Amino acid sequence: MNKITLFPDKRMHQLGDLYGIFFEDINHSADGGLYAELVQNRSFEFDKIDNWRYDHLTAWEKIGECDIEVGHDYPLNRNNIHYLAIKCTGEVCGVKNTGFNDGMNIVKGEEYSFSFYGRRNTGFNNEVIISLVDKENGAPIASESVKIKSCDWEKYNGVLVATESATCHLCITTSGKSMVYLDDVSLFPPTYKNRENGLRRDLAELLGDLKPKFMRFPGGCLVHDGNLDPHARNALYRWKNTIGDVSERPARRSNWGYNQTLGLGYYEYFLFCEDIGAKPLPVLPAAYNPHRRDAAPFEELKPWIDDALDLIEFANGDVNTKWGKIRAELGHSEPFNLEYLAIGNEEVGDDFFERYPYFHNAIKAKYPEIKLIGSSGPFPCGGEFEKGWKCARENKSEFVDEHYYVSPEWMLANNKRYFEYDKNGPKVFLGEYASWGNTFYNALIEASYMTAMEKSGTVGLACYAPLLANADYVNWRPDLIWFNGKKAYGTPNYYVQKMFMANQGEYAFEHSVENEKAAVEFGGDIFGEIWFETIHTSAEFSDVRINGEPVKHNNFTTNKEGSQIVKLEEIGKIGNFELTCKAKELDGIRGFTIRFGVGKNLYYRWECAGWQNQDSAVCSHTNNREAVLAHECRTIEQGRVYDLKLKVENNTVTCYIDGEMIHNVKVNKTVMEPIYTSTAIDENGNLILKAVNVQDTDYEATIETNRKISSVEAEMLKAELNAENSFECPENVSPTTIKVKFDSSVIKHSFPAHSVTVMVIK
């Protein structure tokens, strides 16, 4: 029988704040999501700069016989310049807001707080009716009235109590001949912890139930993609724009293709962290946009550095400091106790690494206690990755932020990745990671990977990403939690995260595993067909040779439409080889791609000048799920002829451009261990054993310890590998409590095939 022996007296390392969450406004996860505001485009600031489909009246429709238009001659304030003008003809007329998704989800008996700024030129005795109207039958289920009393902007508010549950629109109507002007129209349901300008309860509860140690925010690419001018509509995310009166926060273009009201801003983030017991971990831009290679000159860095210093003062300063006083005036006199701060997000390019030390040194000089986090790019390897780690070591950063989205097979092949890291160097902050998918199989493999993270001693912080996805506005998948206007559910990945977070423990301790059977290995052998590919790019390939011999069709051109593939059919399947060719980009947005080792469910790809024509990468694709194996920054010039060489020998891939070696990478085999385990001790002295069985046979084991066992609490996650959760079956894959047999110091247990088990041994 297999044997697991626990040595709780042999402590290895503290687990600290290992597991947390990462919130970025992607997939409409703030406006229309976690931020509870029900009105879409509440300030009439939507614009085509946000999305080509938008205009200032997006989500608004007129009611009755009236004319409506958006004005800007008499703005509410300098940041909110547009407003709605309604020319009333005498009959009842007005506007309605359709909200997000398919409408506003209204629940019987709940109180909904409305507010708006209004003014009118006459008819001050005519009531303005605010109502919630069932979108299906037009029946009002709640209404209140106010009188607009002035020609100048004033704020009006009230409460709507729903008499029925329905999907509704918010309607604002009046009568009489006059001009009525509206701005900052808002409707909030009851919020999490009853916070003003607060968060949607069910989503906030799902996040709180995870019991995260920290929360990373507000991005992500959201942080660093935009204009360097803080006043530009498409500016980089600047935290000072996100605090104070929500009606005075400037509208912002989100790089994910929609508008951000910034209603969910830094103050609200800090409050939410406090409410769920998570430490805040903000991410600030470093005066650099890697998407456009746009960097502030060194002599103009001071305002950016001051932003970082001011944020720390806003979070931690007492009420006698400038920004501590501002925090207190917002309603929070006590500090938020900020410990962590990240500068940059998956940055690439020397411009970032040249600027990072200016931020690091200034922050450490004034706030040496703040733990700083550097960046190492969007991939788990390559030149920019190495630059990030070099920068962190030279500046003595406490953490390096690693990001990657990979196939489950990559996680199995690289399970021991962090065992090889220097325990005396900066710790890893795995700030964004996931396998491609929300099936139980993905969650199972992620769990196996997390046990290694716990044992490594080199991973200090980790958070799955992305966190939330609005099912009607998807930019990216997979995601931890899915929601629409009415419901939300956690994925199988969510439940793995929850099991591990709730049972993290204080210290890792030693244990040994004796297995009856060896690990199962597969993959890694590169053998298959060779294809040429271009994506939205026309290119010319010539003098194509395999092992020095020209192929039959060695000159061809691809066109720009979609994805174009040319197969070297006369070659067939091939193993070790050397491919050479000349390639020239004629027109388009990307360079050249060579697929090799193409089989039924697996192929490899060398993409030369890929995303935004900025990089070269070698990737594996297993069951259509990608993992980057090597990466370097590289740009291709249109019209120039390049000599390409791809060499595959004994599962090592080497790539050359014009004789210069760009990549040299060994492809690892996928390994399935008989069991994946980690052990920890909690603050009460209880022993925690996490065991993940990814194989298709049960794992029978005895578990021994030198301590007397009084009881064992255990839960298990198990399902069909392709099982998922859904709105209809939100807990199709979810943990169950299980019984565990034990005597004084021995447990005998069978860990089922394809299962995640957490035992708390008391």
Image (cartoon, grey):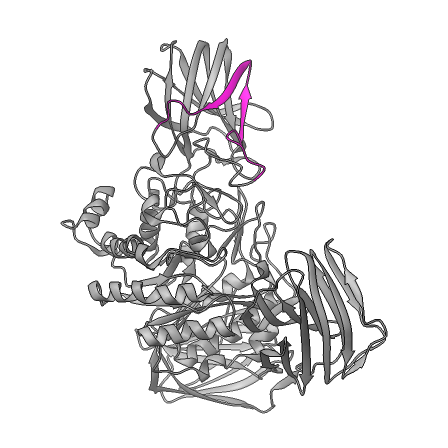
- Locate residue 444, reporting x and y percent: 56, 71
Residue occupying the point 24% across, 66% down: 364
**Residue numbers of the magenta segment:** 52-76
- Locate residue 135, reporting x and y percent: 57, 28
Relative to 154, is 726 on the left or the right? right
Relative to 224, is 573 on the left or the right? right
User: In the rendered view, would you say 181 is above or below 184?
Assistant: above
Residue occupying the point 35% across, 67% down: 373
- The answer to whether residue 68 is magenta is yes
Judge whether residue 264 can be spotted in this image. Answer: yes
Residue occupying the point 68% across, 74% down: 644
Instruction: Count numbered badges in the picture.
Output: 0
Residue occupying the point 51% across, 41% down: 50
Quarter holding the N terminus?
bottom right
- Locate residue 657, reporting x and y percent: 63, 74
Quarter holding the C terminus?
bottom left
Considering every residue shown, the one lying at the far left of the view is: 320
Q: Quadrant of residue 744?
A: bottom left
- Locate residue 420, reporting x and y percent: 45, 84
Main SS category, magenta section: loop
Q: Nearer the viewer, residue 11 or 349?
A: 349
- The answer to whether residue 125 is magenta is no
Q: Quadrant of residue 109?
A: top left
Q: Quadrant of residue 247?
A: top left
Q: Nearer the viewer, residue 748 or 603?
A: 603
Relative to 253, is 697 on the left or the right? right
Judge whether residue 407 can be spotted in this image. Answer: no
User: In the rendered view, would you say 555 is above or below 291?
Assistant: below
Considering every residue shown, the one lying at the far front of the view is: 640
User: In the rendered view, would you say 686 is above or below 169?
Assistant: below
User: In the rendered view, would you say 373 is above or below 711?
Assistant: above
